[in-house]
Image: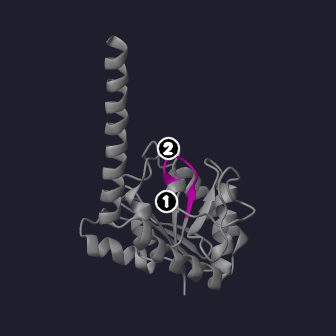
Amino acid sequence: DAKVLIFTAIGAKKHPYKDYQTVHSAVVSLAKSLPAYKILFIILGDEASSEKIGETEIRFVPLQKDPTTVAQFYQAADIYLHAARADNFPNSILEALACGTPVVATAVGGIPEQIKSLKHKASYKNQIMHSIDTATGILVPPNNPDAMAKAVETLIINEPLRKRLGENAAQDTRKRFNLSLQADRYLAWYKEITEKHKNREKRRNRSAN
């Protein structure tokens, strides 16, 4: 059976920040380094002709609006790839993690808050590293297809590791990113900001008097 990789973005090939070129180069490298493996790379959210490199196929699938259908794509995938040059807190990564799909992504923006990165030779160094017991994916440097390819290769070859990271991902997402918990954190942050504002106002009033 083919190992399925997936990447989701509206207009993925031309999106200025999603860096499809890095993902594409990483998959081409995998096709060359793992010639005996059948690999299917799905780009969800764009339309273009399929590409075949040895046993590796790159296939484009138009944007899917039904959440159940999107979840089925994530669940069918072995690894989710995300090579953004810049990003905030992408829903696609949370969706993949929630579906139990380990993620290989670039360490930019808020992504390091979403993924607990496994310690790996290709990992982005300026981050907290996690063991197999808690890791949910691998963070790599931006604009580095070689690092992304090496991280993905490890997860393709090591099935027990890949499955463990997927299990961790689903559990960690339920624990850290459920809606009620996010709402509570936002309210706590908002309360902290308003309290600081009130304290500044009190100090100003005392100084004025």
Look at 72% across and 70% down and name the residue there: 33
Q: Is residue 10 visible in this depiction of the protein?
A: no
| Left or right of 128 in this view: 190 | left
Q: Which mark is residue 114?
A: 1
Look at 35% across and 59% down and name the residue there: 182
Residue 78 to residue 128: above or below: below
> Residue 60: horizontal and vertical position, in percent?
41, 64
Q: Which residues are magenta?
A: 104-111
> Residue 17: horizontal and vertical position, in percent?
47, 44
Mark 2 highlights which residue?
Answer: 86
What crowding class fits label 2: few (fewer than 14 Cα within 10 Å), some (14-19), or many (20 or more)? some
In the rendered image, the residue lying farthest to the bottom is 1
In the rendered image, the residue lying farthest to the right is 121
> Residue 84: horizontal and vertical position, in percent?
51, 50
| Left or right of 66 in this view: 35 | right
Q: Name which residue type carries label 1.
A: Gln
Q: Secondary structure at mark 1?
A: helix
Residue 129 to residue 89: above or below: below
* Count of all numbered marks drawn on residues in the image: 2
Look at 48% across and 50% down and name the residue there: 110
> Residue 12: horizontal and vertical position, in percent?
42, 53
Label 1 or label 2, whichever lies nearer to me, is 1
Residue 28 to residue 101: above or below: above
